[in-house]
């Protein structure tokens, strides 16, 4: 199972559980493992019960079959359009640019439209193709798959799978890949049928116009024939271009040669200007899709994963006081993980951010406990002037790590985000975020506020492993 499939499985478990991790799973003793490894191991354990991988493989196969079916349909439409549009029963003469334009111009318009949507990031994944594909997939599941009714989490997993694969950059590359695949199928069918029809029918290529001069037509033809001519493909010469004017008389000896060069120009033009660009774009989108799946990551700052982190790899610390929450949840994770705390470096630069007097006292106790010699450096940043002073001297800080003390109960606002982000951008030192928990909030509110701080940390590039919740013991006594 690839890393993308493992992470997709973890998202499936999240969809099955809902807002909070409520299912229990045997977790191996991996005290040195990262949270994500424990998370992926838990998802693999729960997959045996929930059968999520089997459903995801089913969704993948269903999507592949749908796109193959649409490709075959477009191939047939492209093949049938040749006889209906180009070859008619009224005569054996074909207007060359009319035949080429009927296939090339719609493709060019569609290509420009796709490029516009592709550059809009999320516009393509929310367009008609995404909705149409989801509608077909859902209709097929409801009509032909009885498992959709039996499986308890079927529709939750259905929504989870296609929300990931059809949204964001993954959806943009996936739907772009499908778009080029369908157009490639259409052109392949049209080109193949065109070769068959030209091999079994004798037609003469002409041009007719009411507003274009002969020089304009000759220039357009030579422009179109430039690349085929470089590739050694037979193309009309200036004399043959002039003779193809409506009403011009071709010598009988040159008629067959004229049909051959015009036919080769039409076929090569569809191959070079129609099939080849779509094929190259198809390969490009396939490459980007594979690369994006390899770089797919979980949003570990979401409330669900923040809650799960407290179960699998707790980061709650206190000064000699055992966390009652960890004691009550002891059965949910192994003893080796019960009181696991992210260790602080031996020497760090402490920064308190807008703490109250009582909170600042607890902050001083914590700094004194872990790094007494750094206590004199501790500052409580409470105003704009103090912020600017700290930002000016950050480059002169000798310590390799900075610990930011904030209160867990505070809602991170835009001003705090801007300050911390400007702080982290000025130096390459390690940053730790220590959340002071006064023990006055309801558990559900603690979970929500903890998630808010994890989201802020993700935005300012502070590793989520460097977030520590500090149970202050003197605030509520």
Image (spheres, rainbow, N blue to C red):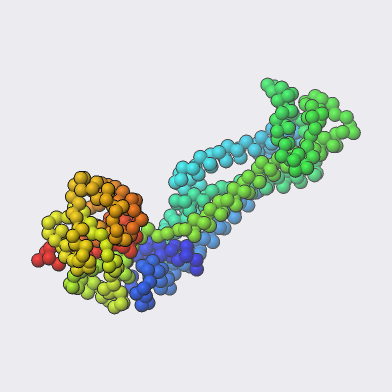
- Position above or below: 63 against 106: below
Front residue of 290 and 399: 399
Q: Residue at x 20, y 48 (%)?
A: 386
Percent coordinates x, y for residue 419 in the rendering? 27, 48
Residue at image position (73%, 32%) is 222
Position in image of residue 115 (x %, y %)? 53, 41
**Could you say which is closer to the camera, residue 326 or residue 123?**
326
Above or below, 68 against 238 in this view is below
Residue furthest right in the image: 253
Nearest the eye: 148 or 288: 288
- Across and down, in percent, residue 112 comes to 55, 38
Question: Viewed as shown, does residue 325 lie left or right of 145?
Answer: left
- Quadrant of the image containing the C terminus: bottom left
Q: Quadrant of residue 403?
A: bottom left
Residue 37 seen in this snapshot: yes
**Residue for point 29% across, 64% down:** 307
Q: Front-most of 250 and 158?
A: 250
In this rendering, position of residue 70 left or right of residue 226? left
Taking 220 as reference, is 422 left or right? Answer: left
Image coordinates of residue 361 in percent, x first then y, are 14, 61
Residue at 19%, 62% in the rendered image:
375
């Amino acid at each position: 199972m690839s890393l993308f499939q493992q992470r997709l499985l973890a998202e499936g478990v999240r969809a099955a559980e809902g807002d909070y991790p409520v299912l229990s799973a045997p977790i191996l003793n991996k005290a040195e493992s990262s949270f994500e490894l424990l998370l992926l191991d838990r998802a693999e354990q729960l997959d045996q019960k929930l059968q999520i991988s089997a459903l995801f493989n089913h969704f993948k196969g269903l999507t592949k079959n749908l796109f193959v079916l649409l490709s075959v349909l477009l191939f047939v439409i492209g093949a049938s359009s040749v006889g209906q549009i180009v070859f008619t029963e009224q005569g054996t003469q074909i207007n060359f640019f009319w035949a080429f334009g009927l296939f090339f111009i719609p493709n060019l318009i569609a290509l420009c439209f796709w490029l516009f949507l592709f550059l809009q990031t999320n516009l393509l994944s929310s367009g008609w193709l995404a909705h149409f594909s989801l509608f077909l997939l859902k209709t097929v599941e409801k009509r032909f798959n009885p498992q959709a009714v039996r499986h308890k989490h079927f529709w939750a997993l259905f929504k989870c799978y296609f929300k990931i694969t059809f949204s964001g950059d993954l959806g943009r590359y996936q739907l772009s890949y499908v778009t080029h695949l369908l157009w490639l199928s259409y052109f392949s069918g049209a080109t193949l049928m065109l070769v068959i029809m030209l091999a079994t029918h004798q037609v003469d290529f002409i041009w007719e116009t009411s507003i274009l001069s002969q020089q304009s037509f000759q220039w357009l033809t030579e422009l179109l024939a430039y690349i085929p001519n470089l590739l050694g493909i037979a193309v009309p010469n200036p004399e043959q271009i002039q003779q193809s004017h409506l009403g011009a008389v071709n010598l009988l000896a040159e008629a067959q040669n004229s049909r051959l060069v015009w036919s080769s120009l039409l076929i090569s033009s569809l191959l070079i200007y129609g099939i080849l660009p779509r094929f190259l774009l198809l390969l490009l989108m396939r490459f980007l899709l594979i690369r994006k799946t390899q770089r797919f990551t979980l949003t570990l700052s979401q409330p669900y994963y923040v809650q799960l982190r407290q179960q699998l790899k707790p980061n709650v610390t206190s000064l000699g006081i055992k966390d009652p929450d960890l004691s009550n949840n002891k059965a949910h994770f192994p003893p080796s993980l019960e009181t696991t705390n992210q260790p602080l470096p031996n020497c760090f630069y402490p920064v308190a951010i807008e703490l109250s007097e009582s909170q600042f006292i607890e902050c001083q106790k914590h700094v004194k406990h872990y790094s007494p010699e750094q206590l004199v450096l501790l500052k409580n940043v409470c105003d704009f002037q103090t912020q600017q002073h700290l930002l000016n001297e950050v480059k002169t800080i000798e310590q390799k790590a900075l610990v930011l003390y904030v209160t867990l109960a505070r809602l991170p606002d835009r001003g705090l985000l801007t300050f911390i982000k400007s702080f982290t951008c000025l130096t390459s030192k390690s940053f730790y975020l220590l959340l002071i928990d006064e023990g006055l909030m309801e558990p559900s509110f603690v979970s929500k506020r903890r998630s808010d701080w994890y989201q802020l940390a993700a935005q300012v590039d502070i590793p989520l492993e460097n977030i520590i919740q500090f149970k202050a013991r003197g605030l509520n006594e």
